[in-house]
Image: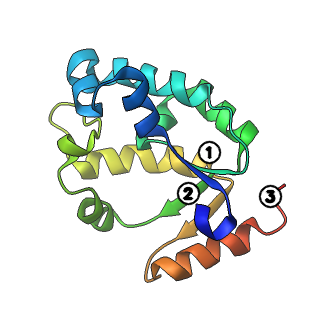
Amino acid sequence: MAKKLGYSFVDGDIIIQEKEKKLLKELIAEHGIEGFWKIEEKYNAELDVEHSVIAPGGSVIYGPKAMEHLKEISVIVYLKMSCEEVEKRIGDPVNRGVTLKEGWTLRDLYNERVPYYEKYADITVDEENLTLGETLDEICRKLSGRLA
C-alpha cells in the first residue's frame, strides 16, 4: 500500500522492538499481556509521521490513547477477513507476538477484537475472495478524497 501511494511504511511492532531492544514475545513474557499493551499504547500514541502507511500491532485497539492519536493523524483501515484466514496468516501466535490470554484460542481473540476494529475503522475493506491487488485497489478507491 505504501509503495502504491508513494508513502513511507511504519511498522509499529518493529518500532517497539527497536526502542525496547527486545522481541515482542520477550516483552510479553517479561511484562505480561497488559504490560505489553501499555508499551504498545505508549509508542503508538507518540507516532509523529506524515504521508505514511502505519501498520500497528493488532492489540493496539486496547489502548484508547493510541487509538485516539491514530484517528487524529490517519485514516484507519480495517481489513476484514474470516477467522480461518487470520489463523492461516498468523501461523504460530506466540512467535508472532500475539497477546493471547491464558487458555484462549485465536478464535476467542478474533471474537473479542472484531468489535473494536469495527468501532475504530474509518474504512472497512472485506478481503473475502479478493486478491492482494484487488484489496489494494479497493482501499485506494475508499481512500479517494480522504488523503491530504
Asked whether the beta carbons under mark 3 and mark 1 sit within 8 Å of each other, the answer is no
Label 1 is placed on what type of residue?
Tyr
Residue 120, disc: 1
Mark 1 secondary-structure assignment: helix
Q: Nearer the viewer, residue 123 or 40?
A: 40
According to the picture, the residue beneath numbered tag 2 turns out to be 78
Q: Is residue 78 above or below residue 49?
A: below
Asked whether the beta carbons under mark 1 and mark 2 sit within 8 Å of each other, the answer is yes
In the rendered view of the protein, which quadrant contains the C terminus?
Answer: bottom right
**Which quarter of the picture shows residue 33?**
top left
Q: For residue 120, say whether it is visible.
A: yes
Q: Residues within 10 Å of mark 1 (few under 14, many from 20)?
A: some
Q: Is residue 121 above or below residue 1?
A: above
Q: Residues within 10 Å of mark 2 (few under 14, many from 20)?
A: some
Label 2 is placed on what type of residue?
Tyr
**Which quarter of the picture shows residue 136?**
bottom right
Q: Is residue 17 left or right of residue 141?
A: left
Give the percent coordinates (x, y) of residue 78. Answer: 55, 57
Q: Nearer the viewer, residue 53 or 3?
A: 3
Question: Residue placed at 52% from the left, 71% from the top?
Answer: 126
Residue 147, disc: 3
First along the sequence among labels 1 and 2: 2
Question: Residue placed at 42% from the left, 66% from the top?
Answer: 81
First along the sequence among labels 3 and 2: 2
Label 3 is placed on what type of residue?
Leu
Q: Nearer the viewer, residue 78 or 107?
A: 78
Give the percent coordinates (x, y) of residue 83. Answer: 32, 62
What is the spatial separation of the Cα atoms under label 1 and label 2, in whole angstroms? 8 Å
